Image (cartoon, grey):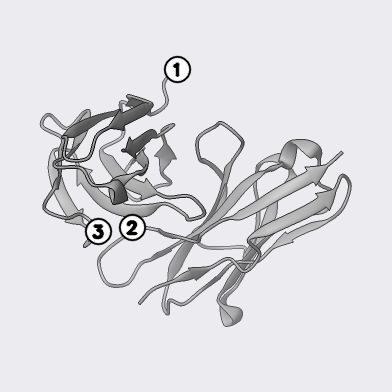
Amino acid sequence: DTGVSQDPRHKITKRGQNVTFRCDPISEHNRLYWYRQTLGQGPEFLTYFQNEAQLEKSRLLSDRFSAERPKGSFSTLEIQRTEQGDSAMYLCASSILENEQYFGPGTRLTVT
Amino acid sequence: AQSVSQHNHHVILSEAASLELGCNYSYGGTVNLFWYVQYPGQHLQLLLKYFSGDPLVKGIKGFEAEFIKSKFSFNLRKPSVQWSDTAEYFCAVRSLSGGSYIPTFGRGTSLIVHP
């Protein structure tokens, strides 16, 4: 399968713990995006990379959230000191520049 | 603020009925438009897109959408739905003004098709 992959698919954590998610984009795609989706809503943009450079961050991305794409390939999204409001589906997508985005299956985070 | 409205949150149809899902946006200027679909248990996938040219766009699985610039709309249509079209449908709009090329998504429309 050469699509976007995300790991883990599900994560349950206790409030206050740190979590890290990984995204592997389609190999030739230079852009990688992170979104958050809650029930009954569409995906909300968090941040994106072009190669290893983080080019834009949403105001939704509080200082507890950090994302990296160190070698311009896979990316990680870390949430520190998780809160119940962080419970959501975290989606990763990739694209070639401004062409259409291809989405991964998402990581469902539940904070108890 | 830029926004995308999908007025129909839940739609229930019988097989062979015609479908039209509304999408309106609040941007001025040049836009790119997308419809994505999420089948139960699967990830978001692109149904169709409009960048330029013919405002009537044909996508996969018999879907089409028409861009009407004067109405700021990009409605999705299918003449005859099937049970397998049961899914969540998301409209997304990307403004080409202002430097950010990140699409804004609507909240989605849940479509249930009864056999």
User: Dividing the picture into quarters, in which one does residue A89 lie?
Assistant: top left
In the figure, B82 relative to B8: above or below?
Answer: above
For disc 1, the marked residue is: A1
State which chain disc 3 sits on.
A
The residue labelled by disc 3 is A60
The N terminus of chain A: image quadrant = top left
Q: CA distance from mark 3 to mark 1?
A: 32 Å
Answer whether labels 2 and 3 touch (C-beta < 8 Å): no
Residue B77 seen by the camera = no
Identity of the amino acid at label 2?
Answer: Ile
**Image quadrant of residue A90?**
top left
Q: Secondary structure at mark 3?
A: loop
Residue in the picture at 37% in, 55% down: A44
Q: Of the residues shown, which amino acid type is indicated by label 3?
A: Leu
CA separation in Å, label 2 and label 1: 26 Å
Residue A84 position in % (x across, y down)? 29, 47
Q: For the residue marked with disc 1, what is the amino acid?
A: Asp
Q: Nearer the viewer, mark 2 or mark 3?
A: 3
